[in-house]
Image (cartoon, helix red, strand yellow):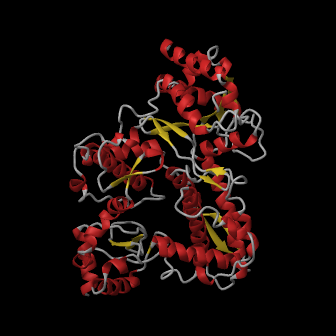
């Protein structure tokens, strides 16, 4: 700690000596980070420059290249992590910015951290350092003091050094002091978690769209209404997240706020996404319903205006898959029904009401199970040896285990390439040419290429897809939107579909379908039915012999 104190003392002395130059608008954030912020946190024990050469997912600190879009920064400057898990964000401003009185720096930081579910994060220009409790929903009108739990000026760093060290040093985070501090602030202030708030947000979208679409499209059935509303919301959220992550042009949905024929113009964006992503979410060969919908401008514009800075408290670039999974698990626990007057009403599903609500598996449990199942299988193996691995979660809900397994495989592959493709030097430090499966991207980080990510994701389907006709007796594929029991009368149609798939381009046909029918007398789903349907896209597994024999009997009968 004494050495840390000396290093910070030297920084303070240098800053004081040249303070007028540093306060000049010409002195920029990049200079500040390099000359003061990096050394400050290195003095607190963090490996800011990754001198240890850790793999990407285990670095202490991730540097984000800030993307300036419409005057708003789209990524926090630093993310401090422990064992690959985010602990806090650090946002920097140059000393000419008054972080104590100006509202935008604090609001920006709180949006990042609140969206990422990080309880505590830091704002600094070195002249001052502010610690924020980021569990309060940020509002554009908030004063910069809202959520601020500590504020230090540079001339008080030495007097407050012990407190700063015990809060922000790597040693203290490892010992749990940071988490204890965050929990103590929670008890003082109360919080509003981002997943609960986002769930309220999209539930209000569902109610608004359901009422509008039901009124304007009186011939829609209940199933069609649920399908149209859900798909529209899914598409909007997907594209908005792509915007904040630099995949789509920022503000393309926001631009629809100007002018009329909003749904028509939104549909054109969806068509473009279909061409770009070739995914089921925008597959208009199978979705013939939503292009024909009539939707007024107002309900859509009410949704769009709250999707962007500064009105939106959500920073979609850091909104994690686990948060979205939790939200969607709850969201899908309700359904739209139609009254006799064709008015839409949202209510809880009977099975959810009976069960007392929807239950979501916490991320730490998912990570533990994935590590001790998929992790054990992968341990010590090459990407080629892992290729035969196939993962099935037949009761996947919002897909938390599948997402966790997928992320584990991505991290494992990246780490393997970093470790094994560096014969001439350390790839992590940039001394060796990168393998074709990787590239150096934003902030100097290494990433898997899109092609390699696609290969890993589709490996469980594409390899076996070629042999699909041979396995036809073991698998029946149908299109549907939700799991349900199916009457025996539908089986001949399913058999005909298998014959069709076996005689056509299986890859093309299979992408239009999304489910597995199990035929058994032992499922106990219903006394009158013996067929159960799993709506899973790109899923393969062999059914037990007794089920196959039942199916064969029906097919040959």
Res 479 quadrant in image: bottom left
- Seen in the picture, residue 23 relative to 195 is either above or below; the reply is above
Q: Where is residue 519 in the image (x, y as percent from the top left)?
A: 33, 73
On the question of residue 111 being in view, the answer is yes
Residue extending farthest top:
2
Horizontal arrangement in the rendering, residue 474 relative to residue 441 (left or right): left
Residue sitting nearer the eye, 110 or 325:
110
Q: How many marks?
A: 0
Residue sitting nearer the eye, 392 or 324:
324
Q: Which residue is drawn at 67% across and 18% down?
A: 156
- Seen in the picture, residue 457 relative to 258 is either above or below; the reply is above
On the question of residue 339 being in view, the answer is no
Q: Where is residue 175 in the image (x, y as percent from the top left)?
A: 47, 23
Horizontal arrangement in the rendering, residue 507 relative to residue 285 (left or right): left
Q: Quadrant of the C terminus?
A: bottom left
Residue sitting nearer the eye, 31 or 307:
31
Horizontal arrangement in the rendering, residue 40 relative to residue 544 (left or right): right
- Seen in the picture, residue 453 relative to 416 is either above or below; the reply is below
Q: Which residue is drawn at 71% across and 79% down?
A: 261
Q: Where is residue 388 in the image (x, y as percent from the top left)?
A: 23, 59
Res 399 quadrant in image: bottom left
Residue sitting nearer the eye, 13 or 399:
13
Q: Position of residue 248 (x, y in %)?
A: 55, 64
């Amino acid at each position: 700690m004494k050495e840390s104190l000396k290093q910070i003392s030297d920084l303070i002395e240098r800053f004081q000596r040249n303070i007028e130059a540093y306060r000049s608008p010409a002195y920029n954030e990049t200079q500040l980070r390099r000359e003061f912020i990096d050394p400050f946190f290195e003095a607190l024990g963090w490996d800011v420059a990754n001198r240890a050469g850790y793999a990407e997912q285990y670095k202490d600190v991730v540097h984000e290249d800030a993307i300036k879009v419409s005057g708003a920064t789209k990524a926090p400057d630093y993310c401090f992590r422990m064992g690959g898990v985010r602990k806090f964000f650090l946002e920097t401003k140059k000393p000419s910015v008054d972080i104590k009185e100006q509202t935008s720096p604090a609001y920006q930081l709180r949006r990042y951290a609140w969206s990422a579910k990080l309880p505590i994060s830091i704002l600094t220009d070195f002249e001052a350092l502010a610690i924020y409790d980021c569990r309060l929903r940020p509002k554009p009108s908030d004063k910069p003091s809202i959520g601020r739990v500590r504020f230090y000026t540079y001339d008080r760093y030495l007097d407050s050094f012990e407190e700063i060290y015990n809060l922000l040093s790597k040693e203290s985070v490892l010992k749990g002091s940071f988490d204890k501090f965050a929990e103590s602030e929670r008890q003082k202030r109360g919080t509003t978690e981002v997943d609960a708030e986002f769930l309220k947000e999209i539930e209000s979208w569902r109610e608004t769209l359901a009422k509008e679409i039901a009124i304007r499209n009186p011939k829609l059935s209940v199933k069609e209404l649920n399908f149209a509303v859900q798909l529209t919301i899914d598409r909007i959220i997907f594209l908005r997240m792509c915007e904040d992550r630099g995949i789509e042009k920022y503000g393309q949905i926001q631009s629809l706020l100007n002018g009329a024929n909003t749904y028509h113009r939104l549909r054109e964006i969806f068509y473009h996404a279909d061409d770009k992503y070739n995914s089921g979410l925008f597959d208009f060969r199978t979705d013939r319903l939503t292009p024909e919908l009539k939707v007024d401008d107002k309900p859509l514009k009410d949704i769009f205006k709250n999707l962007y800075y500064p009105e939106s408290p959500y920073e979609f670039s850091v909104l994690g898959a686990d948060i979205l999974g939790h939200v969607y698990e709850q969201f899908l626990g309700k359904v739209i029904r139609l009254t006799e007057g064709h008015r839409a009403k949202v209510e809880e599903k009977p099975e959810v009401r009976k069960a007392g609500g929807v239950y979501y598996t916490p991320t730490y449990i998912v990570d533990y199970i994935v590590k001790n199942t998929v992790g054990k299988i992968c341990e010590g193996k090459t990407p080629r040896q892992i290729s035969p691995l196939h993962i099935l979660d037949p009761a996947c809900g919002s897909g938390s285990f599948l997402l966790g397994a997928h992320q584990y495989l991505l991290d494992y592959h990246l780490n393997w390439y970093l470790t094994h493709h560096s014969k001439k030097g350390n790839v992590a430090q940039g001394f060796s040419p990168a393998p074709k499966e990787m590239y150096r991207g934003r902030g100097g980080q290494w990433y898997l290429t899109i092609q390699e990510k696609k290969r890993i994701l589709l490996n469980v389907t594409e390899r076996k897809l070629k042999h699909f006709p041979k396995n036809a007796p073991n698998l029946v594929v149908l299109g549907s939107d939700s799991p349900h029991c199916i009457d025996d009368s539908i089986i001949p149609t399913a058999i005909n579909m298998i014959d069709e798939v076996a005689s056509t381009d299986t890859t093309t046909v299979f992408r239009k379908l999304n489910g597995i029918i199990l035929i058994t007398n032992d499922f106990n789903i219903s006394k009158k039915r013996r067929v159960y349907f799993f709506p899973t896209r790109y899923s393969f597994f062999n059914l037990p012999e007794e089920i196959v024999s039942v199916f064969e009997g029906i097919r040959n009968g």
